[in-house]
Amino acid sequence: MKQVSRLDYFTLQVFIGLVELKNGSAVADKLNTTQSKVSRALSCMREVLCDELFVRQKYGFEPNRLALKITPMVQAVLQQYDKIIAATSDKKISSYELTVAAYEHWSFMVLNCIQQSCRCVEGGVHVNVLPWSENVGQRLSQGKIDCSISIAPINHPMVTDSKIGDITHFFIVARAGHPLLESPQPLVDIFNYNIGLVNSNLQNNQQHPIEEYAQANDIDIRVVLKSPSVNMIIDHVSNTEDVCILSSAMSFYYFENRTDVGFTDISSDWRKTFGLTCDSYYLHCHQTVLPQIVSCLESLLTNKLREMQAHYDNTIKSIADTHVISTCCSKNNCTGLECHTDCHHFNNTEPETV
């Protein structure tokens, strides 16, 4: 009994942390302590129970048979500790903290979706949104972050991958009045200009699809800027003759109300020219995230992507519906917008209002 008394609350927390996260540094981060204290707690467990409890694997610690057997018992003890704390405390139930790494054009949507709509746990969910980076997959598998969004599955035993939806829209964005926006063949003429690209999903200097296409077809391409920030790319092209390529209806939010830039939808031409199928967005969650939160996130983010795609399609349809074709003069059969710049010069007549 004297030995068992060494298994205090912190030591039991470390044990459960190693079972769930399988990584000492991740447990230290979660418990806001040091790796040396985690190591001492594990050594204590091993001495008291006379068993190694964990086997070191390539990706971290793997609980052995005894560790798995006693895990429900340890969890029950910790739950009783928590009940004692709750019964003697007047504090409100704290919110569930969720750390999510996402591309810039997903960050705002993730924050809104979760804080405004997630009601699956008592106390609500507090969101900590981090920028997406190349080591997100590694940190996620170690349990140092809870969730992320990217365009490729992570395929790790500690991570669940859930498809959110497909990327169906592609745009060229340039300063207002840029000649490329009026081009009948924008994906041909784009190589006449400097190009900016969003590189939030590129790893190990992987090329963007348009770079691969140019290389395969011996086309000179001048990429002058790569950035994970959609806003930075748009700000750059708004003040230069450079142009940029953006993907997904999620990025439409960043330029739809700007008057200093214009865009052209190249979705159909993009697939025809490059022969590409649509990429997809995936939600990645560490196995320690509560199942009800994972399910809630899948539903919320899938619906948000569909909502943004529908918003773009409806916006374009609304614009098209305002440009009704009509005969505005006797000389030509044209639209009112064309008449403003052409026909009325010859007829000295006022064009009809469209």
Image: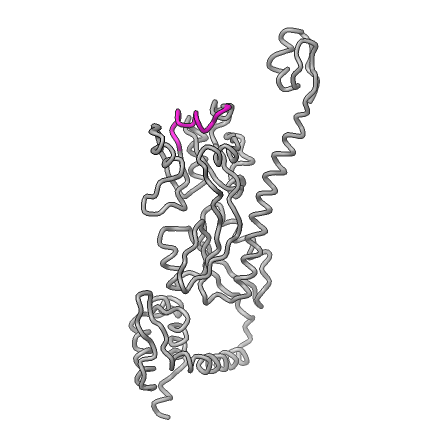
Quadrant where the N terminus sits is: bottom left
Residue 282: image x %, image y %?
Answer: 48, 53
Q: By what rule are the colours in the image chosen?
A: one colour
Q: Is residue 236 left or right of residue 299?
A: left
Q: Is residue 186 magenta?
A: yes
Q: Does the magenta stretch include residue 271?
A: no
Q: Is residue 120 left or right of residue 9?
A: right
Quadrant where the C terminus sits is: top right
Vertical relation: 187 (above or below) 64: above
Residue 343: image x %, image y %?
Answer: 63, 11
Closer to us: 205 or 218: 218
Residue shown at 50% from the left, 32% from the top = 269
Residue shown at 68% from the left, 25% from the top = 324
Residue 305: image x %, image y %?
Answer: 56, 48
Q: What stretch is highlighted in magenta?
A: 184-195
Q: In this view, does 303 lie to the left or right of 18?
A: right
Residue 262: image x %, image y %?
Answer: 52, 30
